[in-house]
Amino acid sequence: MKKICILIVLALLIGNSGSFAQQIVWKEIEPGIWKGIVGKPESYDLLKASGAKPFEEGLLKLAKTGFPLQQDDISASLTDGKVYLQFPLQKEEQLYGFGLNFQTVHQRGKILQLHTDHYGGKDNGRTHAPTPFYVSSKGYGVFINSARYITVYAGTGVRKNSTNPEIAKDRNTDKTWSSRPYSDAVEIIVPATGVEVYVFAGPTTMDAVRRFNLFNGGGVLPPRWGLGFTQRVKSLYTSAEVEKEAAAFEEKGFPLDFIGLEPGWQSKSYPGTFEWARQRYPQPSQFVQQMLAKGIRLNLWINPYVSKEAPFYKSIQPYTGSHTVWVGEVPDFTLPEAREAFMGQLKKDQVDIGVSGYKIDEVDGYDYYLWPDVASFPSGISGEQMRQTFGLLAQRYTNELYRNKNQRTFGLVRASNAGGVSLPYVIYNDYYNHEDFITALINSGTAGVLWTPEVRASKTAEEWLRRFQTVVFSPMAMINAWSSGTKPWSYPEVASQIKELALLRMRMIPYWYSEFAKYHFEGTPPFHGMALEEGFKQEIKKDATNKNLEENPYAEATSKEIKDQYMAGEYLLVAPLFTGQTTRKVVLPKGKWYDFYTGELAGDGEVITVTPGLDKIPVYVKDGGVIPMMPAMMHAPKAGEKVDLEIRYYGTKPGYYKLYDDDGETFNYENGAYSFREIRVIKNAAGNFVGSITDPVKGKPNTVGSVTWKFMSK
Amino acid sequence: MKKICILIVLALLIGNSGSFAQQIVWKEIEPGIWKGIVGKPESYDLLKASGAKPFEEGLLKLAKTGFPLQQDDISASLTDGKVYLQFPLQKEEQLYGFGLNFQTVHQRGKILQLHTDHYGGKDNGRTHAPTPFYVSSKGYGVFINSARYITVYAGTGVRKNSTNPEIAKDRNTDKTWSSRPYSDAVEIIVPATGVEVYVFAGPTTMDAVRRFNLFNGGGVLPPRWGLGFTQRVKSLYTSAEVEKEAAAFEEKGFPLDFIGLEPGWQSKSYPGTFEWARQRYPQPSQFVQQMLAKGIRLNLWINPYVSKEAPFYKSIQPYTGSHTVWVGEVPDFTLPEAREAFMGQLKKDQVDIGVSGYKIDEVDGYDYYLWPDVASFPSGISGEQMRQTFGLLAQRYTNELYRNKNQRTFGLVRASNAGGVSLPYVIYNDYYNHEDFITALINSGTAGVLWTPEVRASKTAEEWLRRFQTVVFSPMAMINAWSSGTKPWSYPEVASQIKELALLRMRMIPYWYSEFAKYHFEGTPPFHGMALEEGFKQEIKKDATNKNLEENPYAEATSKEIKDQYMAGEYLLVAPLFTGQTTRKVVLPKGKWYDFYTGELAGDGEVITVTPGLDKIPVYVKDGGVIPMMPAMMHAPKAGEKVDLEIRYYGTKPGYYKLYDDDGETFNYENGAYSFREIRVIKNAAGNFVGSITDPVKGKPNTVGSVTWKFMSK
């Protein structure tokens, strides 16, 4: 006994300094999803924070398949008190993911420390959603379920004992010398003494993404109104000014589904009181109801830092962290007491009077504002773990307020992470680079999040229009005028084009809504990059020799990757133009692609150059594409409201589409109150296109009125 | 027994998740230096890596004083498996240090992760010498002896239980709202389960720096020749070309003490063989001796990554790390076997034939080139610990080669850390921003390192001259022409001014050498910022409200701090001009300051504006300043060589100087073979200045020939 005891104590004492190889036993926990355990995983992780549960129904529909890698090629150790992981990497393999990056899509060759933060202008792992998940062009995915700052070497380190080693070269004389020799592994450090690791099978890269999303509960299905148009008003607006704003939209014929109120709705902000500013909103309940009666919902800005003047301050105070943010206290939302105090106030003061959602600001970073990592929280969660999951917690428990009322919400948030796939929030930020906003839209598809390239203000009408063109092809069509007060029509030269785009957004709601349904039921991200498309050829990032060594030998060459065009749903390829551009190249994957506006053939597996003019954002439809559209309504259809469909069809291949339908507002779809109706287009014997749609499913919500067909291509 | 065992095991098991306050017992281990132990410090740290031992003799000369802070204001805990430290911070307190920063001197309000790396353009803790040491304007210093990536919150976090809390403000309406409320603490995370912490008393900020430097062994005393001029030649030069280069210097009358050979001296590089390239250097021994005979020493570039073709590869292979750098293996220099193989080769092949030193490249970063943190080393040192100390180890053991021969060396290195104060290396890098190079010179004084603003090439003659003006007022007067092949005279328009400056550097060797002796014996950094000068007023960094919130609310205002002028030794204030400048402001601390060139009064505790012309770098001498100078020799004096002194005196206050003397080449000074001779200047009864110098100390080296006096001020 004594000897055993001494041995155990010794083993524990040296635990932090030695290196111990860990055998990973892979267990298939869902079809095509394997879980491996290294060491003793921590009691708190991303899945626990988010409360995500697999969406079994969706997972079961995916093909059965074997473990997508050689299990022996994956290794783990407990070293230096941390988990070291190693995954194989072939020479011709590209990697995608590792969260919401803004400037790069190809992640091979990157070193990242995944750390929830505002985006600071560099893809270094610090971002709003630093999801520890990646997929490979070889058709598999890897997810590290840890709420720690994970360091990733995505194919950079070259091991001495590599089985496929590079040969050294003499830099003095050999011009082929490279500063970045081939690395045969993705190596990862999890600063914890244990972790759960998940591997997702394909066979395609998209399938691996689908499995990840379904494993996280399936993607969010927003309410229909969430896919309409939203305007955020100036911070210190009064209820009267908000009503005036809504009236202006109506008068000018601009659609509007929800208005966002910024910090000024609160009596005090930064830190917040979480109660209405009576001087600006004297009768909140009446105001909210009057707006709802006009078909306009309200979304309220918050950041969850609690002022001493908040009505629930005393109840929450014992359940906040050691450090403050703008002198406001930070709720430990893992504790029921903190949730009760905080969410109780939101429920009583706002949700119960009809407020439809929140914009949750500053739960991401930055370091100089948020609690430091030395902060501690009463639950025992560390500052680091809270930083990685605060956005998840805020989303989860505000969403719960709506779930409890069987009412969907759709809001905005500044931070998310793995596990948040099914939470009804769209990420936004303060960064305002249009090109990078589009790259983020691409990367959102592999990060398990939604992202909006929100429009705020612009230097020119051209910029205004170019930005607007992309936001209507995104998860949330929004103008965020909290500071500028800009309206859609603020640039008269382009006001009619803006209106046209806003109306197009509305007309496409049947398509958007069905694509989001696929996100939920099938795991397919509605917005994603070309790399997830079949028929698209990958390129491996290469290091270029830097010619100007004396100036800065560390300036890295950037690789060719598609960062400026993306897929919007199953059929649409969107290729935005940016301010100053009149022409651009579009990479069309294999297969025929058609102009969205004219139906004309645009190309097939080729790079085309287009000059669309200022009014148009180039959009292409895949051969056989079906786009269900509705009339240009001023608000999204209400629950049960019937709308007529115009079903567009492109190309020549047989057309197929699954049109989703439900009440658009509740969670009844989770209990089966939904249907997918099948749309088909074929060419009949006479050589004419013929469309058909299956009958409404009996006993399920049916919002389809009349159906007309539009065969776009000649 | 059984119960105790279970309790111990339980305590160890929860060690990583709980939070345990740690009582720090402060023990005065040297006069004015206290050591505190938190948890169980690791077996490997910065002092162990460097082998630094306190220089007792110097420490004993500093004033006795009490613990400089309230001990109760310092707290520590073991939380989340790491050490959390907290030090007090008063409202009117500025902080300096945290390593070799390039863009900021004021460190209050910073968040840094101290991480050895190439400088990436941002002061975020990643730098060549991320020394975990800071000093306060209140006159104390703190050093964390850890070879880990330490996170520092230098007055950013605001604790809920602060005894001096800020009052929350409403950002909606209160224009005085600040995004950065007052923080009353420096908080630090050491990712280890224990650490040694040191506190250094003042009373002045400079005294705290002195104690730190002396605690680390005292500053390096270079050989006299190290303070002369050095030229680094193009990488693929042959011995004949090097000889030609030396001849050109002689012919043109440019001083030259040592020549640097770049990668091409080696038969292969990146990774290296560490043997001469016989095609370029057919007779190394003869070549080195011939150069020495001309009074010119050789310094060899290396980076310590070992090619399979190195002659000692087989001996070192078992003692290298798990990962390679450019496919070269990384010696674990903490192991005697690795040192024997590697240093044995250097000794046999280079040091023993007369090579005078090394330039140790790429031991700093960057992440994409060096071993990843997942790397392991055969000694058990982690990749992280090796990264923090690799530069120290390389310096320490190459220096040992010279110590063993009782011969001083003076070389270049890309990485250092605390503990390296006495090691004979100057840091350089690839970054080439002249302004930032000067800021680094300032910060070197609180980082325990030397730094050279090396000159490489320039776009214009003006830039060439401006850069040259600063490098002759720095620890190493060097042109690094490894890529460009530039010579001092390459810009004919300014060649005569360059020559003048090079000769000035030589003439000032008695001053430089004495100032370095004070670095060694008294701990006073020869190059340092204004903040360490008495009579200089500090400014606290303030956060400015960002006007353009919509564009980027995270753009921080920079504070006013003196980043472009510095002290060179006890008496000289250097205020460089940069390309494009014709005029600049100079902040003169309290007391009279005199023009170095003319002796004229420049000002007293005021900001002056100067327009010195292109030929001059503004330099000011403190009232009573004494500058010993020698003739403009082509090489630094050899051991025992007598040189005449011209002693300059400035101002009106009684002049005093300690002139250092020794053989200039060996370590015999460590055994007493040195002297400080006292120089005094007073005004006699007749109102004339009279200078005096104490007699040479019997039995000590004396290199002073005749003495003449030059009273510069009227």
Image (cartoon, coloured by chain):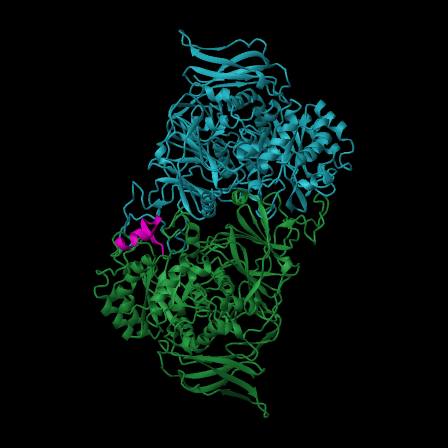
Chain colours: A green, B cyan
* Residue drawn where x is 31% and y is 75% of the image: A295
Point out the residue furthest to the bottom here.
A686
Residue A447, image x, y percentages: 50, 62
* Residue drawn where x is 24% and y is 68% of the image: A285
Question: What span is colored magenta in the figure?
Answer: A313-332
Rendered image quadrant of residue A623: bottom right
Q: How many marks?
A: 0
On the rendered structure, is B182 left or right of B400? left
Give A181 or A422, whichever is nearer the viewer. Answer: A422
On the rendered structure, is A474 left or right of A187? left
On the rendered structure, is A143 left or right of B104? right
Give B52 or B43, whichever is nearer the viewer. Answer: B43
Asked if one can make out residue A433 in the rendered structure from this viewpoint, the answer is no
Residue A547, image x, y percentages: 64, 48
Q: Quadrant of the C terminus of chain A?
A: bottom right
Give B654 or A508, whichever is nearer the viewer. Answer: A508
Residue B580, image x, y percentages: 50, 39
Asked if one can make out residue B508 in the rendered structure from this viewpoint, the answer is yes
Residue B520, image x, y percentages: 53, 23
Rendered image quadrant of residue B77: top left
**Residue A183 sits above or below residue B71 on the image:** below
Give A405 or B220, whichever is nearer the viewer. Answer: A405
**Residue B268 sits above or below residue A233 on the image:** above
